Image: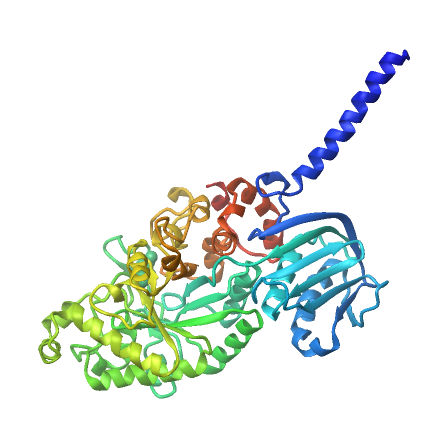
Amino acid sequence: MKIKQRLILRATLLNVVFLSFFLISSCNWNKKSPMSQISVIPYPDSVKKTNEVFLLDNRTKIVIEEADYSTMENMVKYLNTLFIPAIGARLEVAELRSKQPHIYLRFNNTLNLGKEGYHLFINKKGILIESEAPNGIFYGIQTLSQILPAKRSQTAIEIMGVEIYDQPRFLWRGMHLDVSRHYMPVSFIKRYLDFLAMHKLNTFHWHLTDDQGWRIEIKQYPRLTEIGSWREETLIGHYRDQPHQFDGIRYGGFYSQEDIREIVRYAQDRFITIVPEIEMPGHAQAAIAAYPEMGVTGEEVDVRKIWGISPYLFNMEESTLQFIQNILTEVISLFPGTFIHIGGDEAIKDQWKASEQIQEKIKNLDLKDEHALQSWFIQRIDSFLTAHLKRLIGWDEILDDGLLGPNAAIMSWRGEEGGIKAAKSGHDVVMTPSDYCYFDYYQADEENEPLAIGGYLPLSKVYSYEPVPEEFSAVESSHILGVQGNVWTEYLDSPAKVEYMVFPRIAALSEVAWTYPVNKNWSGFQARIEKLLLIYENMEINYSKSGLQH
Ligand code: TNX
């Protein structure tokens, strides 16, 4: 080869080497380049690769400081639930000795990432997960679970090197589940909590009572479950279809206080707070079926068999307020979280308008109308909860008329207007506008989907949601506690159907709730979800494939 040719070739080769080095280092899994992101959902705050690989096998130890043994016990369990299927062995806990390959879990209060934030570092020597608190260690483990190869090898696995600093955007990262319209077994509630945890969601809003069934045992009022948890039969087909047809099958179920304690413990182990919802003054037909004297008309009524809005409201006698407070006292004793949801939605006022006693009450209290009476009632319940060191949260209707105690929070579902009004008047808000957050809506073309309530909420629209209105000041923004997906179950009569509606939309919601907007990227999410789907498959989750196309 001639010298000149050789020189050109050398220069070209050098260029190639140089260029590829530049390309590799600059693509560095950065946020702007979707294809190079690591497959983690919700996407972490800061991600860098370490260019090293850690080989994990059954000789790897889990290392914990002696003082942390009891606090970290659960974390060791979680790690092993990942590794047992992955490498076919349980890892042992050992003392820190530098040469041994290990996974090191430790507390570090100098990180400045908050109690849910964590630092995850993987190089060829091992894995470090550190946080200020167990919450962050748990989330670090969740991230690690998505970095592991999804294929189960039963020997050794290669884990790619990475350094992550991560923390959530919002405090309230929620999923709701309606167990009144259809009862879901305890085993599924636990599985649902697992779903939340793996997506780093920390709030489970448990919709326990409604017109079609009362699902929580209240010791002082046994008829609530003896009568109120059973309906004679259930509507077949859509509520819109006329004439209504029924299945003729008695339907019911409820959670004993023992069940609830077990579920609360299960949630605590996963850093999930449960917010129980007891509906009032409307959506109360099942309670009134059990105790007709708490209703407005006093007449006997059945537990509702159809969907839609029931006219049955609680009356506003002092004895009824006492009944509600006694129920709440038991609820408070079961749920250690701060918030109690009291519903407050869709309380149509026909019965209150027609009732002499109610009209007299309005007059005696010197109130304007029935809406003002609802507001008076909510304020009474708010004072009761506040006196018991709890906070009231309710659907946005509770702010429609009149005042609300400063402690009370709003869940904005009829769009964002209620939430905006609430935040501007200094109330805390959870955003859950139906257009973006109702997972009972269709997620793909209606003709090919199982029967649903209506609406259309594709994955991309969930992903696009921004919970803080653009025009908000810093103070107003600070009132947006977070965001939540709601799962109403009129048309979901089994866990499999719930899973179908929840997945994959929960993945998009988790990124709205956890990931800062600068790190969000729709095409990146679409690429990353492929890995998560393998995990869903390992867990035999009935996710919607059509939901992925929209
Ligand atoms: C409205 S959202 C309701 C629920 C229904 C839901 C169906 C809300 C506070 N109330 O009772 O199940 O629509 O999408």
User: Is 505 placed left or right of 141 in the picture?
Assistant: left
Mark yes or no: residue 375 visible. yes
Ligand 1 is found in the corner quadrant, namely bottom left
The image shows residue 323 at horizontal and vertical percentages of: 28, 84
- Number of callouts: 0
Where residue 212 appears, x then y in whole percent?
A: 32, 69
Image position, residue 309 (x, y; %): 25, 63
Left or right: 206 in relation to 300: right
Out of 38 and 47, give the one closest to the viewer: 47
Is residue 480 visible in the rendered image? The answer is: no
Name the residue located 30 percent from the left edge and 59 percent from the top edge: 424
Residue at (38, 87) in percent of width and height: 219
The residue closer to the viewer here, 328 or 376, is: 376
Instruction: Quadrant for the N terminus, please.
Output: top right
**Does residue 95 sit above or below 328 in this rendering?**
above
From the viewer's perspective, is residue 523 above or below residue 300?
above
